[in-house]
Image (tube, grey):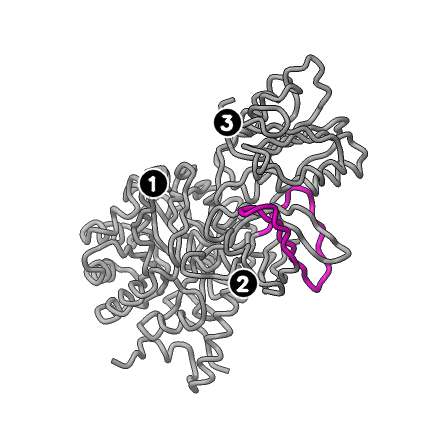
Amino acid sequence: MKQIRDFRVKAYDRLNEDNYIIELGCDEELPAIKAGNFAEIQVPQTADVFLRRPFSILDADHKNRSLKFYVKAIGKGTRKLGELAEGTKVNLIFPLGNSFNTDHIRHALIAGGGSGIAPFILLAKELKEKKIKTIFLLGARTREDVFLADEFAKYGEVLITTEDGSLGDKGLITQHSIFSKHDFPYDKIFTCGPDPMMKAVARIAAKKGVNCEASLENMMACGFGACLCCVTETLDGNKCVCTAGPVFDTKYLKWQI
Amino acid sequence: MADLNIHIKDLHFKNPVTTASGTFGFGEEFMEFMDLNLLGGIFVKGLTIKNREGNEYPRMAETPSGMLNAVGLQNKGVDYFVNSIYPRIKHLHTEIIPNVNGGTVEDYLMVTEKLNETEGINAIELNISCPNVKEGGMAFGVSCPSAVAVTEAIRKVWKKTLIVKLSPNVTDITEIAKGVEGAGADAVSLVNTFLGMAIDAEKRKPILSTVTGGLSGPAIKPIALRMVWQVYQVVKIPIIGMGGIMNATDAIEFMLAGASAIQVGTANFIDPQVSLRIIDGIEKYLAGHHYKKAGDIVGQLMT
């Protein structure tokens, strides 16, 4: 059930100058939250920041009634959200969107590019609970852009690629050796990141005949299916990423892969 | 408590607060957030004769105190509305008002005729002001003869309440308003979005796939308010006012300027429950100023 609820800023975990994790707490119990769900956060309004901002739910702590979001400060809204005093009231609409499908998997590969790690802690927890072996492949431009690797390591092996070779394998995420090895034991790929990267991952998945789910982050005005702004082209025509997604089976998307 | 009822011909709003087409889906998207029965009315998403996929992504750009959209009337067609959606929402105790669109007068007529056969629909909103479609839409609303022609044609087949939604992208909105009044409109709703654009300077590209789109939100409120006030001076039919209404004070301003009822639009995206707060706020205002009914403040601007 979707909620509109006031939270308070509990803490920030500053990953570097532009990246942070924000923890928001509330008084009431949290509703059920699934891996892949997102929230529309209302950053205190200014003339420049008018609409809510959608963020994947990174982690949910039902006992402490708090949610965590990974945020990359790329615009006025995301910067503003990173500058709030502890205790500032922030309104959320949540949980929104669909979730990852973790049924019938033996061995999962999670491929997160850049800021596309945002939905994966909740997913890692779910996979671990279901005793599904998981490997994490994180791609970034340089070592400074690799976040939460230690956190993911709690749930499985972590592999890293950086474009400049400063950490892990040098190159793009799809150039990692696991894709070229004869042995490809994974029967499900979860991906999130920039569109070209997700498309490249989906292409490999299609070639290997492995099911692939991608979490999309199209621009949204509402987040609950009213504005019809965040559409992506699917086999059934334009669908709202906020309600039909954000998680899509990549075979269903018209990505020309 | 003040009487909030508003009547526009066959149309009965239990209060002056309705939701604007294209910002409230078919109501269902908001059911988890509020009791829809409390609304005066719901202007549902624009309908066309055939399924429309709308424009390519990106369709939205946030702008100072507002947003641009270029959705382009994505909808599954009037038949799908009549057969699949309307049966799910017709039990609601609020007026459901379809928003009628077309590329030609024929298209408008075909959509209207389908709705004519649908029991329970007391009014339609004729959209001659959508800025995001290549054919028809705003083209009808920016010229007085074509606005009159399409209104006259629909008037002949639609006997119940006919509301014509006006475009602000005109030299003189009062001319169009007088024209559609003469052509038989029972009310006018104004304003639709303002044609605008947004640019990504780094990429040297427009943000919207269509280059231009419709601007809404508080950024347009002063202009919308001025247009409602101007139209109020020249027509006798009721006005349904909209344009950047975010709270009850905004709504009351539109009523003072001459609107009998208002539509809440873009604000629904930010606060899905905002309409209910606006109803409460209007009630408090009326009580505080000792008005007996909502209609008593319509056009009561002291100049």
Residues at marks 1 and 3 on the same chain: no
Q: Of the residues tagged 1 and 3, which is closer to the observer? A: 1
Q: The C terminus of chain B appears in which quarter of the rendering? A: bottom left
- Residue nearest the viewer, comparing A170 with B3: A170
**Is tag 2's residue or tag 1's residue first in the polypeptide sequence?**
1
Between marks 2 and 3, how big is the CA–CA gap? 36 Å
Residues at marks 2 and 3 on the same chain: no
Crowd around label 2: few <14 · some 14–19 · many ≥20 (10 Å): some
The local secondary structure at tag 3 comes to: loop
Residue B18, given in percent of the width and then of the height, sits at 45, 63
The chain carrying label 2 is B
Q: Amino acid at mark 1?
A: Pro
| Mark 3 lies on residue | A255
Q: Most extreme residue toward the bottom, as rendered? A: B290
- Residue A207 occupies quadrant: top right
Q: Which mark is residue B206?
A: 1
The chain carrying label 3 is A
- Residue nearest the viewer, comparing A149 with B5: A149
Q: Taking A109 as reference, is B234 left or right?
A: left
| Mark 2 lies on residue | B273
Q: Amino acid at mark 3?
A: Trp
Residue A26 lies in the magenta stretch = yes
Q: Amino acid at mark 2?
A: Gln
- Residue B186 visible here: no
Please determine whether, in this image, residue B169 is positioned above or below residue B106: below
Residue at image coords 38%, 62%: B218
- Residue nearest the viewer, comparing A230 with A14: A14
Q: Which residues are magenta?
A: A11-39
* Residue contact between numbered discs 2 and 1, judged by CB atoms under 8 Å: no
The local secondary structure at tag 1 comes to: strand
